[in-house]
Amino acid sequence: MAEVALTLSGVAVAFGALRAVDGVDLSIPAGQRRAIIGPNGAGKTTLFNAITGVVPPTEGRVVFEGHDITNLPPHKRAALGIARTFQITNLFPSLSVEENMVLALRGLSPQKFSLFGSPDLSTADQDRISRALRLAGLADRSATVVTEMAYGDQRQLEIALALVATPRMLLLDEPAAGLSPSERSIVADVIRGLPQELTVILIEHDMDLALGLVDYVTCLHEGRLLVEALPADIRTDARVQEVYLGKPHHA
Amino acid sequence: MSGVSRSKSPMGALVVLAILAVGVIAPFFLSRYQIGLATQILIFGMLAMSIDILVGFTGRTSLGHGAIFGASTYVVLYCVTQSGLSPYLAVLLGIATATVLAAIFALLAVRTNGVYFLLLTLALGMIVWGICLRWTQVTGGENGLRGDIRPKALSDYKDFYWFILALAALVTFGIRRFVQSPFGLTLRGIRDSDSRMRSLGYNVPLHLFIGFTMSGFFAGVAGAFYAFFNNFVSPSTVALTQSVESLLMAIIGGVGTLYGSFIGASALIALQNLVSSHTERWQSVLGITFTLIMIFAPEGIVGKFRALREKYANKH
């Protein structure tokens, strides 16, 4: 079996009496594409927040590539190679695409502390930025200010930001949320084009989109792990159908 | 709220040089009183610009900068009049004090934002004001500290004006360089989204700490030379009014524009002096003026000008 990238053991996140995530065990091999699905309120985004450190788990342990990251703040997890996108577009709206990318690129470089240095980019940085923009389908947009971009392009920039620093694990939180069918297929192509060695965890509401993109599927329900299966088997799983698709209508 | 334009257009550089040239020859056409006002505008313009680093480029509104500025003024006057130090050494000590004070403010304030940041910096400034008012043996209490401390080389009012003009040009260059640097970009990133900055690997409180401390350093530079200008300091220099007025200057000029700070300082100081010579109700006139500016040009004078220019450029 391949090396394990991420292990969750007994992870729980409680907000008062509400246990949004309730004792989840999860193990994701390096390089795997994993979808986390489940109906509204299943705890998908809360689980993401526990993995990225936005909301530290109240119980259990999170281990990433051998490091116990359970109590690390988000910026230290990013330093280990964990990148994420946000369900609700979270960019730097008043900055240009290029400035967004520069911030994403320098998050882990000491250059971010250059107090009076020149703002000009090195050619190497420029190349990395244009490569990530190309991967995300946004070539030639670097001068555009984010507020002037179409929503679909902003979603692609979400992914480009997470990619440019070459993370080891990428968490995509509903990357296609609110997109039209044609925009969805662009985002799906972007996800398919991600480097093979990158571990990807994808939350997605749209089953058709999610199942076509991943190697393995985890279904959550009411904060608990319900089923783990191959994409081909998940559609036919009775428990998943019941909580996620509703009871099947027999012809 | 966009950043300083990075375009290196020869036009922009020419405008800056032209304004600087007007500043250099101005004393030949102005009265002693007017030159004094111009000097004051430059000093408070620097203070307003230091606040703009936070308000315009970091999205954090400080109401404690008057205290940081005034602490520097106090230290300079105290060192020269009470300890007999050289005024140049006193300036360095004043700036150092302001920087350390800003670092203390920053340590307490960086984990907050919005109205909490505002209130915390306000409260910290009030503490400084309270100390200056009550610690009579050192600060002179309500009487303040007085003394002719300006060094001989700068004793002529015109020479002093040119010196402050050069200093303001240097400080403006420094702040501009600072907000455009890779670090300055991280401040603008925090202004736009601190959760995204965290997920990209930035230690947001550390960046805010550095940004606030640097801003305090520049406020301290302005405060130290204000001691040379005024030869007097009292609790009103560190009072809330000082913080509010300099914040107003930054806002009237246009936050996030840097140069707007000098426009805002000119507007406020000119109005104060012009209107108060005509009517005792000058504060009401000021209040109405600023209300009108906030309604019709909330982006400030320079901000409004830039917006109009952009609109014009798009039409043609």
Image (spheres, coloured by chain):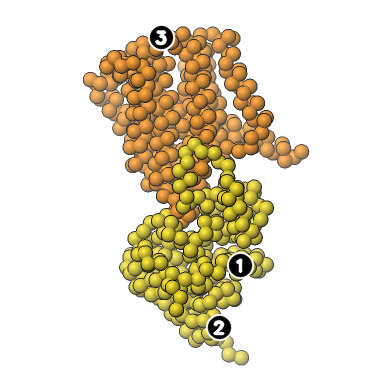
Chain colours: A yellow, B orange
- Taking the view exactly as shown, the residue that stands out farthest to the left is B137
Using the numbered discs, state the Cα–Cα distance from disc 2 to disc 3 in whole angstroms.
87 Å
Task: Decide: is A207 above or below B198.
Answer: below
The disc labelled 2 sits on which kind of residue?
Answer: Ala
Picture quadrant of residue B13: top right
Q: Are marks 2 and 1 in contact (CB under 8 Å)?
A: no
Residue B85 position, x and y percent, is 30, 16
Q: Camera-side residue: B175 or B285?
A: B175
Using the numbered discs, state the Cα–Cα distance from disc 1 to disc 3 in whole angstroms.
71 Å
Q: Tell me the residue at 47%/24% (across/down).
A: B44
Q: Camera-side residue: B276 or A185?
A: A185
What's the mark number on residue A193? 1
Task: Decide: is A147 above or below B39.
Answer: below
Residue B132 position, x and y percent, is 29, 25
What's the mark number on residue B152? 3
What's the mark number on residue B131? none
Residue A248 position, x and y percent, is 55, 86
Picture quadrant of residue A41: bottom left
Q: Are marks 2 and 3 in contact (CB under 8 Å)?
A: no
Q: Tell me the residue at 33%/37% (across/down).
A: B104
Q: Mark 1 vs mark 3: tell me if same chain.
A: no
Q: Chain of mark 2?
A: A
Using the numbered discs, state the Cα–Cα distance from disc 2 to disc 1 in whole angstroms.
21 Å
Q: Mark 2 vs mark 3: tell me if same chain.
A: no
Task: Decide: is A220 above or below B185.
Answer: below
Q: Which residue is mark 2?
A: A232
Q: Tell me the residue at 47%/10% (across/down).
A: B157
- Taking the view exactly as shown, the residue that stands out farthest to the bottom is A251
Picture quadrant of residue A196: bottom right
